[in-house]
Image (cartoon, rainbow, N blue to C red):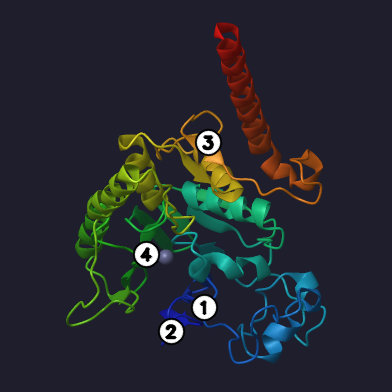
Amino acid sequence: MASLRFFGGVGEIGGNKILLEDGDVRVWFDFGQSFAMGCDYFTGWLRPRSQNGLGDYFEFNLLPKLRGLYAEPLLATTALRYEEPHYDAVFLSHAHFDHAHHIGFLDPSIPIWCGSGTKLFLEAAEETSGYTDYCDHEYRTFRTGDSVEIGPLKVEPVHVDHSIPGSYGFIIHTSKGAVVYTGDFRAHGPKHEMTNEFLGAALNSKPAALVTEGTRMLDRERRRNLSEAQVLAGVKAVIEEADREGKAVFYTHNGRDTDRFMTFYTAAETCERGMVVTPRTAYLLRKLVEDEHLDLPDPMKDDRISVFFRRKRSGEYQESDYYIWERPFLEKMMKALEEMAMAEAEALCGQSGEG
Ligand SMILES: [Zn+2]
């Protein structure tokens, strides 16, 4: 008997925690944090205490109290006894917070299946945030065309276009027919053909059940969906206007949306401008260069990209004031500053020689 149970993501945006059971096999699809989690009790810096493990989360019913699911040390402050995992795997559709963030609570012996891009995003978040810990799970990565067998279940991941690379939908073959889980997807993005491929494969599977989000499911769409090409045209128009007045241009975007980053990068390139990114964006780009399927610039090698560093206590750019992961970019910027200073000094010498 195959069944689906939902422990999040119903009547709310995000927080998807979908449990698929078929015979003795139990598999989760996504294990995210909902955007509204705990908003009745917590605000600003007031959060569930990390040193209390799962205690505060259980007290306020922010996570399901299920046996054989969570990491042993996190249960120490709760009434739930630790048991060996009752679950076989977690499949992540993509690395957005509302689909993946709560995997940090799970028993590390439950393997996590995800796209290789998702794994890079999770690693970057852990390495740069200081407080995100996704636990030492065994990660197993897949690509479109793979088929993963977990007992009687056969899971086919198929890529979709979304505002973060490495996003997938799933076609899951169960004893009761196919179940399709779409994850998040979009049809107006630069790689919309990936979404179409997934929809085609989903249709061919003649699904017995379809699981999808209803966030933007409307009779009439009122919001404007701009394509990346339209955003690019708008950004270029803003830069050209600023060029006429000799002004800087400030921009912002979701740090994980690399399509949007590339729109700004392309606009900067076309308008022959440099661009400044935060150390965290630089770190993520450096990490994603590892994925040969993503064509992103390497901030260590690309002269167009500078990395912004705030001066710390000393008033100088002292290496010890910055996190270890930030330092390689700081070195690059210091070298560029030295070269600029030398070029300026040479130019001054040249002028005084002529005089
Ligand atoms: Zn998403």
Which residue does the image show at 54% across and 48% down from the upper left?
A: 281
Q: State which tag comes first along the sequence, 3 or 2.
A: 2
Q: Residue at x 52, y 56 (%)?
A: 113
Q: Which residue is mark 2?
A: 12
Quadrant in the rendering for residue 4: bottom left
Element type at marker 3? loop
Q: Mark 3 or mark 4, which has the lower sequence index?
A: 4
**Mark number, residue 172:** 4
Left or right: 229 as drawn, with respect to 61 = left
Mark 4 / mark 2, whichever is N-terminal: 2
Q: Amino acid type of disc 2?
A: Glu
Residue 34 is tagged as 1
Tag 3: residue type? Pro
**Marks 1 and 2 in Cβ contact (< 8 Å):** yes
Q: Quadrant of ligand 1?
A: bottom left
Report the mark closest to the observer, 3 or 2.
3
Residue that numbered label 3 is attached to: 299
Q: Amino acid at mark 4?
A: Ile
Quarter assignment of residue 40 = bottom right
Q: Give the camera-side residue of 272 and 180.
A: 272
- Measured Cα–Cα span from mark 4 to mark 2: 24 Å
